[in-house]
Image (cartoon, grey):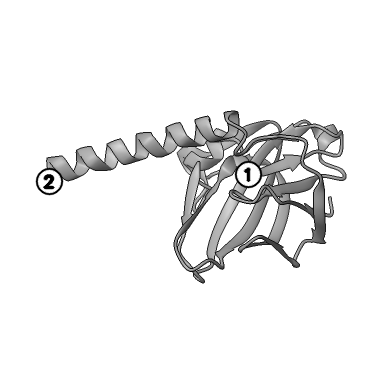
Amino acid sequence: MRKLASMSVTVTLVLAMLAIALPASGCGGEGGQEVTKTVKVGETLTLYDTTFKVTRVRTSATVGSGPLKQRADGVFIVVNLTLTNRKDKPAIVGEDRVRLKGGNGKKYSTAAIGRVVVPHALAVLQELQPDLPRKVVAVYDVPEQAVKGAQLIVKDFWSEETGAVDLGL
């Protein structure tokens, strides 16, 4: 049992290192990719063989509840989305591939606190099984001036195809 737990920790560490290394090596991150498709909340965005559908967007001063309740440094933008892998084998979507572009033109990554206090938070690396939709929540802590006009910028993990979801804020 200890060996299995040790292997689980090792796999988690390797996945975390890949999440850091891949964007730095040009397989992810911010590059100069142009957005090729733009959709609205409720519409499906398909990039390569992965679909992204934002089902709900809200702003909040806090996330979590009870003793886990956390206050934003700015404003939390909470995005509920459904990810579906259309490939014939498992695939991985990294949280670095789902960024928020504020109305101020700046880009934001998910808030680490969101992964701790929000159920079903988008993980550093999210494994998706074929044709099995996965509902996740992405939480972004942004300055108030970034809220209006914000978009979710999504980059496919393998093809580098980039799309956007107008969040309607």
Give the residue number, with chain letter if any, for mark 2: 1
Give the residue number, with chain letter if any, for mark 1: 97
Q: In this rendering, is residue 26 above or below 130?
A: above
Query: Residue 51: x and y, percent?
Result: 64, 63
Residue drawn at 87 percent across, 45 percent down: 149
Residue type pointed to by label 1? Arg
Secondary structure beneath label 1 = helix
Residue type pointed to by label 2? Met
Q: Are marks 1 and 2 in contact (CB under 8 Å)?
A: no
Q: In this rendering, is residue 113 above or below 132?
A: above
Q: Quadrant of residue 38?
A: bottom right
Q: Is residue 123 left or right of residue 39?
A: left
Q: Which mark is residue 63?
A: none
Residue drawn at 81 percent across, 61 percent down: 40
Q: Is residue 25 left or right of residue 14?
A: right
Q: Quadrant of residue 166?
A: bottom right
CA distance for labels 1 and 2: 34 Å
Query: Residue 135: x and y, percent?
Result: 55, 61
Task: Residue lying at the far bottom in this picture: please name it.
Answer: 131
Mark 1 or 2, closer to the camera:
1
Label whose residue precedes the other's in the sequence (1 or 2) = 2
Query: Residue 6: x and y, percent?
Result: 21, 37
